[in-house]
């Protein structure tokens, strides 16, 4: 069976094109790399490189082995990083993506307690629509993040945390007197936010799918970027919008806006995401743990307040 050192030597030789360059990467002698490759080829009775030119060329067997070697070496390196990450939080950078309405989920106080515990850690928080957060985590730009489902989860590990109901919001009391049907919603003058992602937004996608099943088409009257802008327009009677319960429960929610559930209840599912491959840095892992705890604690408090009121 191939050893990790043999696979690493093979992989670096394939990437650099010479045993000499691979030896430099591994911090060893060229003869050691050549011997590792020779033993690997002898074990399977196959040549993995065409030798003799100025640069090593992979044979068909080498091409077949390459993706498996990459996966094995990456997995081993990720395991080592995960173990090292347990040691301390004396530095590094935490990179984390936040869903569009993070402040409404009581996450605005995330940074201060984190830095109080870990003053040497730098923090990079990126506030995006869930579509953007998912793409940034999948590409490696961010290590982890909070999103609303559904998203494209290719290459991602998704951990659902909680559901938050989505409501119809209007300045006209009569329009919020009873649960809203999709027909009523489609006939409304809709003021929708997250204009830059449009119908890729997870909540909009749910509504669009429901409308499509009923032969309806949803057309926004006005599109803006932020929920606060939409609420300001709704408050002035320009049109209607959608908001989650976390927004409706916030002290800044306008007094003259009325909410109603959808006839078929609609929910946002908030989830944590990270890449399937690759261990989190200790800083980001701790920040993600704190965000999860604050989110669930805040939600528990909201439910308790609702029960007592």
Image (cartoon, rainbow, N blue to C red):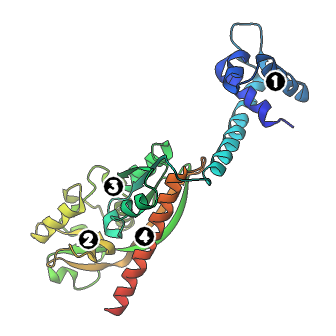
Residue occupying the point 26% across, 53% down = 195
Q: CA distance from mark 3 to mark 4?
A: 26 Å
Marked residue nearer the N-terminal end (3 or 4): 3
Judge depth for marks 2 and 3 and give the one in front: 3
Judge depth for marks 3 and 1 and give the one in front: 1
Q: Position of residue 186 (x, y in %)?
A: 25, 67
| Circle 1 crowding by C-alpha within 10 Å: few under 14, some 14–19, many from 20 | many
Vertical side of 92 occupied by 47: above or below: above
Marked residue nearer the N-terminal end (1 or 4): 1
Q: Position of residue 261 (x, y in %)?
A: 31, 79
| Circle 3 crowding by C-alpha within 10 Å: few under 14, some 14–19, many from 20 | some
The residue to which callout 4 is attached is 295
Marked residue nearer the N-terminal end (1 or 2): 1
The picture quadrant where one finds residue 62 is top right
* Numbered label attached to residue 185: 2
Q: Is residue 21 left or right of residue 300?
A: right
Residue occupying the point 31% across, 92% down = 309
Badge 1 marks a residue whose secondary structure is helix
- Front position in the image: 102 or 162: 102
Marked residue nearer the N-terminal end (2 or 3): 2
Asked whether disc 4 touches disc 2, contact meaning CB atoms under 8 Å apart, the reply is no
Q: In this view of the protein, can residue 248 be seen by the observer?
A: yes
Q: Position of residue 308 (x, y in %)?
A: 35, 92
The residue to which callout 1 is attached is 37
The residue to which callout 3 is attached is 199
């Amino acid at each position: 069976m191939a050893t990790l050192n043999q696979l690493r030597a093979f992989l670096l030789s394939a990437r650099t094109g010479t045993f000499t360059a691979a030896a430099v990467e591994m911090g060893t002698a060229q003869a050691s790399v050549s011997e590792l490759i020779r033993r690997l080829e002898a074990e399977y009775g196959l040549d993995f490189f065409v030798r003799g030119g100025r640069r090593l060329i992979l044979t068909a067997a080498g091409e077949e082995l390459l993706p498996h070697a990459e996966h094995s070496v990456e997995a081993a390196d990720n395991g080592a990083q995960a173990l090292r990450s347990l040691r301390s939080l004396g530095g590094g950078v935490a990179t984390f993506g936040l869903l569009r309405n993070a402040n409404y989920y009581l996450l605005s106080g995330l940074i201060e307690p984190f830095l109080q515990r870990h003053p040497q850690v730098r923090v990079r928080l990126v506030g995006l629509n869930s579509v953007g957060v998912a793409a940034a985590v999948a590409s490696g730009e961010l290590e982890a993040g909070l999103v609303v489902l559904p998203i494209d989860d290719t290459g991602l590990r998704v951990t659902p945390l909680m559901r938050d109901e989505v409501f119809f919001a209007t300045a006209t009391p009569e329009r919020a007197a009873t649960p809203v049907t999709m027909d009523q919603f489609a006939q409304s003058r809709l003021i929708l936010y997250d204009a830059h992602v449009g119908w890729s937004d997870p909540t909009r996608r749910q509504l669009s799918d429901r409308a499509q099943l009923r032969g309806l088409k949803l057309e926004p009257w006005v599109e803006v970027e932020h929920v606060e802008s939409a609420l300001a327009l709704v408050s002035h009677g320009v049109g209607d919008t959608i908001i989650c319960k976390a927004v409706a429960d916030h002290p800044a929610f306008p007094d003259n806006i009325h909410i109603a559930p959808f006839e078929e209840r609609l929910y946002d599912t908030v989830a944590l995401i990270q890449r399937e491959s690759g261990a989190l840095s200790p800083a980001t892992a701790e920040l993600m743990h704190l965000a999860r705890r604050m989110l669930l604690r805040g939600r528990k408090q909201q439910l308790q307040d609702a029960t007592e009121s």
